[in-house]
């Protein structure tokens, strides 16, 4: 085993860095890692078994749920329930938050917001999907935790991470002291440290946006896209366009190579498509911890005050110079609208 550091070993080594509740947060991260391995096993064999396709139900956002969405949702909730450190799970797949009321979780201090399987429309075509999670400390001190405990600003996150089920499976997380990435070694069934102290390049030449929606974009985004397409050797333009349609995969690539991912408001999604609590906040925390930036086009994602569980926001996230330039275009050509 020399030279290999597993996720479990790493978490225990690093728990001295946590300012409080050392063992509990470690156990919570471990529980998420275990559920991720089970989800990975199912995602990997999705093409082999009759688990593909719509489950026939619709989630709160009116989107069809795929069977693996439901499977992943159940796995994470069950791992967090039996782990005993989590008192509420807020998930993309459930209309309301899920209170965890089990004998082992009586003194649980943590709230987990999770998108169990993001980008699930990609499963049927064997394209990378992901899990995104965010961890908060509960604010209330007694009784059952409430919605107020869930509706915390992104700056209050104590940890966040994502799992990418791609050509290999990786778990990337932060506890506010940098970002570390672990690749699943299927032969030993362990996430092994493969990307220590990940840093996002401050500039890049990849832009990721669903350009099919161009006519519906705010003027500032249209101007940024045109800027990205202009020839200018000094700033490495025209940029390269890369869009997978799986937020985790698009942002993971840009984190490593340098780039910007944008999901703006559009005519059909006037508040943006992606959800603040379990998609944008965790990705923003990770990217900031890696040296990048995340904004809604006008202000920092992590400073947005959440008012509802499934709140949506526009997002501009990635290499700092690229996000700042996009923000400049927004400030110049688009008036902020908050509904
Ligand atoms: P989902 O949570 O329903 O899977 O939607 C989120 C996904 C993101 O992963 C992805 O970046 C985006 O939706 C793609 O949306 P679009 O198809 O509109 O470009
Ligand atoms: Mg999602």
Image (cartoon, rainbow, N blue to C red):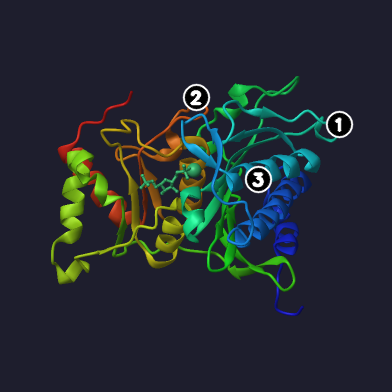
Which residue shows up at 75% across the image and 63% down it?
9
Tell me if residue 326 can be seen.
Answer: yes
Query: Number of labelled discs?
Result: 3
Q: Quadrant of the N terminus?
A: bottom right
Q: Is residue 299 above or below residue 33?
A: above
* Residue 101 image position (x, y, % from top left): 78, 28
* Classed neighbour count for the residue bearing mark 3: other residues with Cα under 10 Å, few (<14), some (14–19), many (≥20): some
Q: Residue at x 75, y 58 (%)?
A: 12
**Mark 3 — residue?**
71
Q: Which mark is residue 256?
A: none
Label whose residue precedes the other's in the sequence (2 or 1): 1
Q: Circle 3 sits in a helix, a strand or a loop, which is it?
A: helix
Q: Viewer-proximal residue, 135 or 33?
A: 33
User: Which residue was labeled with disc 1?
Assistant: 103
Which mark lies nearer to you, 3 or 2? Answer: 3
Answer yes or no: is residue 291 visible. Answer: no
């Amino acid at each position: 085993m020399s030279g290999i550091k597993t996720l479990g070993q790493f978490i225990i080594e690093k728990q001295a860095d946590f300012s409080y509740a050392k063992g509990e947060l470690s156990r919570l991260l471990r529980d998420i890692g275990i559920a991720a391995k089970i989800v990975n096993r199912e995602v990997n064999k999705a093409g082999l078994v009759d688990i593909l396709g719509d489950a026939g139900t619709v989630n709160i956002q009116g989107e069809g749920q795929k069977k693996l969405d439901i499977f992943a949702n159940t796995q994470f909730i069950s791992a967090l329930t039996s782990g005993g450190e989590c008192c509420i799970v807020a998930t993309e797949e459930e209309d309301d938050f899920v209170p965890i009321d089990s004998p082992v979780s009586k003194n649980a201090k943590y709230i987990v917001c999770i998108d169990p399987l993001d980008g699930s429309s990609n499963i049927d075509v064997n394209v990378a999907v992901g899990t995104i999670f965010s961890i908060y400390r509960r604010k209330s001190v007694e009784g059952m935790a409430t919605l107020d405990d869930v509706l915390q600003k992104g700056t209050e996150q104590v940890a966040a991470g994502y799992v990418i089920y791609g050509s290999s499976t990786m778990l990337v997380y932060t506890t506010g002291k940098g970002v570390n990435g672990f690749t699943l070694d299927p032969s030993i069934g362990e996430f092994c440290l493969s990307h220590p102290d990940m840093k996002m390049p401050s500039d890049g030449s990849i832009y990721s946006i669903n350009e099919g929606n161009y006519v519906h974009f705010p003027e500032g985004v249209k101007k940024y896209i045109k800027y990205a397409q202009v020839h200018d050797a000094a700033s490495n333009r025209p940029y390269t366009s890369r869009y997978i349609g799986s937020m985790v995969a698009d942002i993971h690539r840009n984190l490593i190579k340098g780039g910007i991912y944008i999901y703006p408001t559009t005519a059909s999604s006037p508040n943006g498509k992606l959800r603040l609590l379990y998609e944008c906040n965790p990705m923003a925390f990770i990217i900031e911890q890696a040296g990048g930036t995340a904004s809604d086009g006008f202000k920092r994602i992590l400073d947005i005050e959440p008012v509802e569980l499934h709140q949506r926001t526009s997002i501009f996230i990635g290499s700092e110079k690229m996000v700042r330039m996009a923000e400049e275009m927004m400030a110049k050509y688009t008036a902020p609208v908050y509904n």
